[in-house]
Image (cartoon, coloured by chain):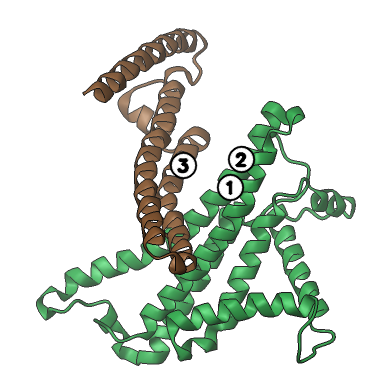
Amino acid sequence: MEHPILFLDLILGKFGLHIPPQLSYAVLTALILLGLGWLASRHITLVPRGAQNVFETIVGGLEEFMVDVTGEEGRAFFPYIATCFLFIMFCNLIGLIPGFLSPTSNINCTLSMALCTFVYTHYLGMKYHGAKYIKHFLGPIPALWPLFFIIEVIGHCARVLSLTLRLFGNIMGEDLVLAILLFLAGMFLAPLPMMFLAVFTSIVQAFVFTLLSIMYFTGAMEHAH
Amino acid sequence: MRKSLVFGLSMLLYLMWASLAMAAEAGGGAASAGLGSFFSYAMLAAGLGIGIAAHGTGIGQGIAVSRSVEGIARNPEASGKITVTMLIGLAMIESLAIYALVVSLIILYAYPMAKPLAEALGIKI
């Protein structure tokens, strides 16, 4: 499969920089999100209109949904959850534009986000429970503690793997399908139906990643079974 | 009964074609000392892997959607919550097929353990 033509690659190539495309597009997505946020917060009124309205709907809806799952203590980590959702959704969607690349179609990006969730989960567990956090990993019967500990540790590592591979596989798979359809039948606009499906799965995968993060945080905060 | 007969016949035909292709590939490969027959097995593994994963995913997602549609039919007011829960469940089930896809792509593009295994078995790659 030949190297795709990417705008940022061409622009940065003129300056002589050879930054990997997933990094430059991730920075571009972050700048776009910051720009949209700044645009929405220029004239804040009590009765929202325009861009402020859109952002209030998205952020407010996400916050209500999160507090439904985690309870009132969850508001503390809402910034991380909202960043996860918006960043992953924009990263996924940006790959559908010809000449742009999804940063999340590279396993480095998804692995780093899954590791952030993993670290934050254990940080929250230790913050709320201290040393007694280890009780989450042990079962109900003291005699079976070694066995349960190994199983729980493997389960926690499997969470990182599953978060990474789910997002990476979905987004890279859809990019690959679009590239192959373009190669096979580009003249008949064959990728177009796939793009509708790709928009849908991009949003759903961002939401699933965020939802799983919320559920892991809730599991770490609550009392052990 | 009829379904398993159709399935068995299609598997037989597929294996006939595949063995023809692999025989030709092996003949050409032995002459050119390239990645001949190992590559055709890799293609077979990658294709069958994702195909079998798609079976299970199709059945699982079908059951999920059918139960959620039934739930909406019983209680049309809850259709918003049921739809959201159904979409989340579908994404979870789909992720299993995605794991199989990643393994297939690794087999096709990354040839893991190809050299060490071949040396152990004495096959020339």
- Residue positioned 44% across, 21% down in the render: B40
- Left or right of B93 in this view: A47: right
Q: Nearer the viewer, residue B115 or A185?
A: A185
**Label 3 element class:** helix
Report in which chain the residue with disc 2 lies: A
Mark 3: amino acid: Leu
**Which image quadrant: the C terminus of chain A?**
bottom left
Q: Which of B8 and A116 is in front in this view?
A: B8
Residue that numbered label 3 is attached to: B101
Query: Would you identify the image quadrant in which residue A129 lies?
Result: bottom left
Residue that numbered label 1 is attached to: A172
Query: Would you identify the image quadrant in which residue A63 lies?
Result: bottom right
Q: Is B64 placed above or below B8 here?
A: below
Residue A204 location, x and y as percent?
Answer: 55, 59
Q: Is B106 placed above or below B44 here?
A: below
Figure chain in brown: B
| Tags 1 and 2 touching, CB below 8 Å | yes
Report in which chain the residue with disc 3 lies: B
Mark 2: amino acid: Leu
Q: Colour of chain A?
A: green
Residue A118 location, x and y as percent?
Answer: 45, 72
**Label 2 element class:** helix
Residue that numbered label 2 is attached to: A176
- Residue positioned 57% across, 53% down in the render: A201
- Cα distance between the residues tagged 1 and 3: 10 Å
Label drawn at residue B74 = none
